Structure formats: structure tokens, C-alpha cells
Image (spheres, rainbow, N blue to C red):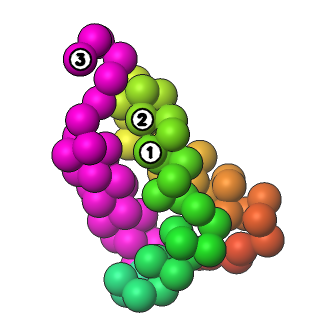
Amino acid sequence: MDAFEYSESDVLYTQLSLFQKFMKRHSLDKMTALQLFEENEVFEILSDCCESVQLDGDGEILNDIDALLRNNGVTIE
């Protein structure tokens, strides 16, 4: 594995960590947050962009997730 390859467990940990932080940020229950992530393919995007996710930091990635959802017409508080 070279420096830019991430194991499945690394990707899963990152996805779950950001999912939990997203729920907390927006005071959402698991089912609502899960529906938003699934409908907007957030888990897939996080998996595809794992290197950037690791480099940018959680706050920036959460802002990106919020922007993605807004661009997809989702209103969250």
C-alpha cells in the first residue's frame, strides 16, 4: 500500500466519524441524517475523495457536505 492508498477500514472510520459529526452539527437523528447521506451519495463521495478528506480536516469537509446538500436543494439548519 503506497502513501495515498487507504484501507477499507480507514475509509469506513472516516465516513462514520464525519456522519456522527454531521448529525451533531445539525442536531439530526440517525435516520434523517442517513437518508440525506444516501439520497445525496455523501458516503460514496467521501470514499472517492478519501485523500482530500484526510488532508482538509473535519470542519472543512463538513462545510463541503453542507454545500453539497444545499446545491442539491436540501434545506438543513
Residue sitting at 20 percent across and 46 percent down?
9
Q: From what the image shows, is residue 51 above or below residue 20?
A: above
Mark 2 element type: helix
The region drawn magenta spans 1-27
Query: Mark 1 packing: few (<14 Cα in 10 Å), some, or many (20+)?
Result: some
CB atoms of marks 1 and 3 within 8 Å = no
Mark 1 and mark 3 lie on one chain; the one further toward the N terminus is 3
Q: Which mark is residue 50?
A: 2
Q: CA distance from mark 1 to mark 3?
A: 17 Å
Residue sitting at 46 percent across and 77 percent down?
33
Query: Mark 3 packing: few (<14 Cα in 10 Å), some, or many (20+)?
Result: few
Q: Nearer the viewer, residue 16 or 25?
A: 16
Looking at the picture, how far across and down is residue 69, in whole percent? 67, 63
Looking at the picture, how far across and down is residue 76, in whole percent? 62, 75
Q: From what the image shows, is residue 5 above or below residue 45?
A: above
Q: Nearer the viewer, residue 37 or 20?
A: 37
Q: CA distance from mark 3 to mark 2?
A: 15 Å
Residue sitting at 33 percent across and 23 percent down?
5
> Badge 3 is on which residue?
1
